[in-house]
Image (cartoon, rainbow, N blue to C red):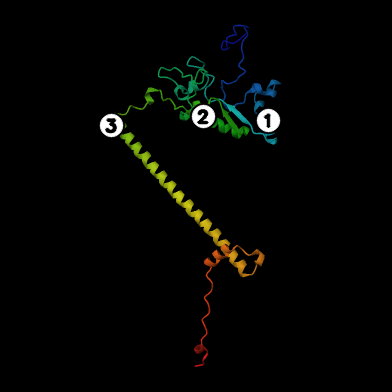
Amino acid sequence: SPSPSSPPPAPATQRYRVNFWGYSTVAFMSPMTRYSAAVANGASAGSARAELKQLVKECHKRGMEVILDVVFNHTAEGNEKGPTLSFRGIDNRAYYMMAAGGEYYNYSGCGNTFNCNHPAARQFIVDCLVHWVREFHIDGFRFDLASIMTRAHSAWYPAEVAPKLPPFAVKKLKRELRKAAAAAAAAAEREGQRRERSYRRRRHEKRERKRMRMMIMMVLLNYQGFWSPQQQPSPSWRRHVRQQVAPPPPPLPMTARSLTPA
């Protein structure tokens, strides 16, 4: 016979339903035993851990990563009328998003919403992830309904709502925000101009170095007689080289007086 906590039977078949989906988590650091072949063959529940570790090891041997589907947006405790299994008895308002009257906010569609951005709940989530990585060598995670993790913690609770600012304080805050935005825009513009100047300077220096290397190579090859008459560079290039490299000064003219001994 079913226990008092069993779900009601289906209206059509009058059979008791079993949750095969498994998204109402109770033990966040334990693998699901009904997925274990060892447990199905009569082994203890602890054998599911060894089986999962062996599965991850075999996947890694074959170059496959293991991504674990985790559900931190709700728990199996249901709404405010559900059973007390863990978090509800530890700190109801810390672990669940609740209205002022004690009602649960049901953003998850499963009766409750885990208060992910409360410091205690956030630390619990991090501890769970670290456990799966260290103990089972899980490579990554898929977060079910991850948008709930972006909600501010208990912002609807009257004791934690920030007081409304007076008009003069709002105007002062807007002025400061505008000044900060203008200063940030000016700093970004100056940084952009500095980077543009630096880029132009580097580009000019690169062109100059390349031009000087080509000139030096052409002068050295021409000086060593490397060019044959058929391979002489174009006149414009030779004229450019002659303009850049000054020829040696002509010798002084010899006169009759300079040849006469003193």
Q: Note whether 163 is above or below 199 in the view shown.
A: above
Task: State the image coordinates of residue 198 (x, y, percent, origin top left).
Answer: 47, 52
Q: Which residue is mark 2?
A: 124
Disc 2 on helix, strand or loop?
helix
The kind of residue on which mark 3 rests is Phe
Mark 1 sits on what residue? Answer: 55
Callout 1 touching callout 2 (CB < 8 Å): no
Q: Which mark is residue 168?
A: 3
Q: Residue at x 51, y 53 (%)?
A: 203
Between disc 3 and disc 2, whose residue precedes?
2
The residue mark sitting in front, 3 or 1, is: 3
Q: Residue at x 58, y 29 (%)?
A: 142
Amino acid type assigned to the residue bearing label 2 in the image:
Phe
Secondary structure state at the residue bearing disc 1: helix
Number of numbered labels in the structure image = 3
* Earlier residue among tags 1 and 2: 1
Residue 160 x, y percent position in the rendering: 38, 26
Mark-to-mark CA distance, 3 and 2: 42 Å
Type of the residue with mark 1 = Leu
